[in-house]
Amino acid sequence: MAIIEVRGLSKTFMTKDDKVEALKDIDLTVEEGDIYGIIGMSGAGKSTLVRCLNYLETPSKGTVSIEGRDLGKLSGRQLRDLRSRIGMIFQSFNLLMQKTVIDNVCFPLLIHGTGKEEAKKKALELLETVGLADKKDAYPAQLSGGQKQRVAIARSLACDPKILLCDEATSALDPQTTAGVLELLRKINETRGITIVIITHQMSVVREICKHVAIVEEGRIVERGLVEEIFRHPKSRAARQLIIDGKDPDEWSAQAETDEIFDVSSDVIPGLQSGYTRIRIVFGGEAAFEPIISAMTVKFGIPFNILKADIKPLRAVSTGEMVLEFSGGKQTQEEVIGFLQEKELGVQVIGYQE
Ligand SMILES: Nc1ncnc2c1ncn2[C@@H]1O[C@H](COP(=O)(O)OP(=O)(O)OP(=O)(O)O)[C@@H](O)[C@H]1O
Ligand SMILES: [Mg+2]
């Protein structure tokens, strides 16, 4: 069942002397229990999009429905109730610095009328869940970044949310701390069935825990789908830059729009000799590199030059990626691609020199 349903969403900000179209005609469906990633450049509209999901920002056009209820049709009170069931965490943690860890976690409960004792009991349970029960009387200033984010996560769980929105929740953390926080989010998703929306600049975060991803560019979703699928067959220019070139969204170049992945023959690839093709191959779980390479060498009678071979986790499953170069012109190129596609491997041409 779709827990979040966005249709035709646009958001325009009017400032004194300017008009910013932050979101343009966004459609988005998030299924219950999913971990959904939203990735894009700075200024692409990601935060505006998550803020529209709980109506902290009112859309200029279009609808947002949570569990089938159109947020635009709710009263102020209904909206506040619903919002309390949508947790949010941020890059900057947003903890109350004058309150202890446990009081931070109690805070939303007390606001919603839970008694003091009950709130304390629940807060302590939540601190246990995030592994910080021993820090309950500490102040946020005495905690590391990763610990602060764990407190923020515990607080976001206080009102038993159905959805957790994370806006760059790991961007301020080092890779190891990030891995710990992502692991905690995965556990929360699994044990509590909470749907999680993750906004990030980092493809590594998407690969690590997201099932689906949407790529946002200049207020539009340019590509979306299963993370595995997009990793195997990136189609949009943004997805190619993210996955093939390994660029952060903020390094995406604004060069000519092209969604055509096989027509890159005009690109000058440094070091690529005449008649050579460079391809990228993606391997699923158990497939191995060597047998494929030796089979191709025998079949085509040419050497395959391995430029890169890498195994990375994709939602805990290791996935291989390899970049190869070979000669033989267009005809060999087509035959090699045909051979690899028959083996059901993801394959893209990333360069060809006439
Ligand atoms: N309250 C506002 N008033 C005017 N313009 C705004 C407002 N909020 C956001 N914008 C503009 O909308 C666009 C999208 O901003 P948003 O914060 O959603 O981007 P983002 O993708 O979250 O970026 P970042 O990765 O830097 O956080 C930007 O051009 C921003 O300047
Ligand atoms: Mg943002």
Image (cartoon, rainbow, N blue to C red):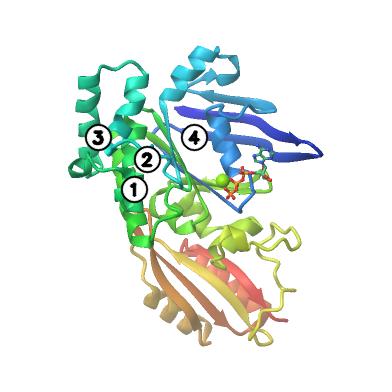
Give how far apart the Cα atoms at labels 1 and 4 are. 36 Å
Q: Mark 2 belongs to which amino acid?
A: Met
The x, y position of residue 319, in whole percent, is 39, 63
Badge 4 amino acid = Val
Q: Nearer the viewer, residue 341 or 68?
A: 68
| Mark pair 3, 1: CA separation | 20 Å
Residues marked 1 and 4 touching at CB (< 8 Å) = no
Could you tell whether 102 is left or right of 16 in the image?
A: left
Q: Which residue is mark 2?
A: 97
Task: Determine the residue positioned at 76% across, 62% down.
Answer: 256
Nearest to the eye among marks 2 and 3: give it: 2
- The CA distance from mark 4 to mark 3 is 26 Å
Asked if residue 220 can be seen in this view, the reply is yes
Closer to us: mark 4 or mark 3?
Answer: 3
SS at circle 1: helix
Q: Earlier in the sequence, mark 4 or mark 2?
A: 4
Secondary structure of residue under mark 4? strand
- Report, in whole angstroms, how far the alpha carbon at label 2 lies from the one at label 3: 19 Å
Within-10-Å neighbours for mark 1: few <14, some 14–19, many 20+:
some
Circles 1 and 2: CB atoms closer than 8 Å: yes
Counting every numbered tag in the picture gives 4
Q: Which residue position holds label 1?
A: 141
Crowding around mark 2 (Cα neighbors within 10 Å: few <14, some 14 to 19, many 20+) is: few
**As drawn, 307 above or below 281:** below
Q: CA distance from mark 1 to mark 2?
A: 7 Å
Q: State the residue position of label 4.
A: 30
Measure how far apart labels 4 and 2 are at the Cα level. 34 Å
Q: Are marks 4 and 2 in contact (CB under 8 Å)?
A: no
Give coordinates of residue 318: x percent, y percent.
35, 62
Quadrant of the drawing holding the C terminus: bottom right
Tag 3 residue? 126
